[in-house]
Amino acid sequence: MLLEHGYHGLGVQALLDAAHTPKGSFYHHFVDKEDFALQVVDQYMEQVHSALDLCLGDESLRPLKRIRRFFELTEESYGREGYLGCLLGGLGQELSGTNEVFRQKIEACFSQIADRTARCLDEAKQVGDLPAGSNPQAMANLLVDCWEGAALRSRLQGDPAPLNTMLDFYFHSAAGE
Amino acid sequence: MLLEHGYHGLGVQALLDAAHTPKGSFYHHFVDKEDFALQVVDQYMEQVHSALDLCLGDESLRPLKRIRRFFELTEESYGREGYLGCLLGGLGQELSGTNEVFRQKIEACFSQIADRTARCLDEAKQVGDLPAGSNPQAMANLLVDCWEGAALRSRLQGDPAPLNTMLDFYFHSAAGE
């Protein structure tokens, strides 16, 4: 609901109605809507890290294929939600202009994903699947950023095509797949 | 203010206060906040098309340089606003999950930018600056999408670096600059 409606567009009452939960329960678990949304982001990131563990830890694949598999899994999860894009991108766009807590939180999430991706890109470089002069950290941030733009366009179109086009381009061009 | 606060985060009263305008004037010009925001998007797109006219029409530059110049001009305008990213991306993320008018509006804006960019990429292909097998329409959409992701990261970091990294990557990798 947070991804679909956005932070300000989602009322606490609508949440309570959807969860068949009385208001007292909500405020027992969460200080306020901001606290709720920050905890949703934490849960979202737990899923992200699980998917990263699964994909980047799969040594049966070459390092670049592990990274691509992670983004393909992410695309599958977007699909289950009707291609509404990425919760991090949505909250980051909506809130980062005025809410420093969310700005730092969302930036930290992207940095975590980029850092783990960078370590795998570095492994690709070590085994010769990337040019020796590659900068894994810069390439990882670039991948996360381009992915977020493609996720927005996928949300606007309700279609996975922008995500696939972006991955094909990145792994073909930057990583020489 | 719409870019900084987001659509739902921006109250009409805050707008009136900033513009030193009475409420009656606002509702004389705009049916409601949605009408206001749609007209802001129209004005934003007038500026975008002017910048596209200026850059893509500059035949002293090779076609790919014209496109890069447009995105560099856009980056300069982001800088004047403190790197808050792109209004289209912000409204698209926040509203497209629940508001079909904005979803279609923002998608149409991106399509317009991509279509004009595609015509210039096609010119690059005709003069041999892109491989003969290139797909200008797909490359144009990809550029717009990756730009939007970089604009989000630029907003989160308050820094133009993600924009420059993305342009360097795109024009180096995809367009063989």
Image (cartoon, coloured by chain):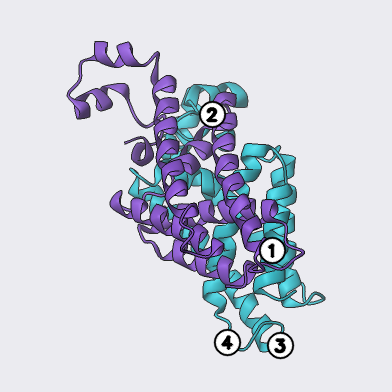
Chain colours: A purple, B cyan
Measure how far apart labels 2 and 3 are at the Cα level.
47 Å
Which chain letter goes with mark 1? Answer: B
| Measured Cα–Cα span from mark 1 to mark 4 | 20 Å
Say which quarter of the image contains residue A112. top right
Q: Are marks 1 and 4 in contact (CB under 8 Å)?
A: no
Residue B70 can be seen in this image: no
Image coordinates of residue A163 in percent, x first then y, are 46, 61
Q: Horizontal placement of B66 versus A79: left or right?
A: right
Residue lying farthest to the front in this orientation: A60
Q: Are marks 3 and 1 in contact (CB under 8 Å)?
A: no
- Secondary element at tag 4: loop
> Viewed as shown, does residue B96 lie left or right of B76?
left
- Alpha carbons under labels 3 and 4: distance apart: 13 Å
Report which quarter residue B145 is drawn in. Answer: bottom right
Task: Look at label 2 and name its amino acid.
Answer: Phe
Q: Earlier in the sequence, mark 3 or mark 4?
A: 3
Quickly name the residue at label 2.
A102
CB under 8 Å between discs 2 and 3? no
Residue type at mark 3? Val
Amino acid type assigned to the residue bearing label 4 in the image: Gly
Q: Residue A52: x percent and y percent? A: 47, 48
* Amino acid found under the numbered disc labelled 1: Phe
| Residue receiving disc 1 | B169
Quadrant where the C terminus of chain A is found in the figure: bottom right
Judging depth in this view, the residue of A115 and B163 nearest the camera is A115
Q: Secondary structure at mark 2?
A: helix
CA–CA distance in space, label 1 to label 2: 28 Å
Q: Secondary structure at mark 1?
A: helix
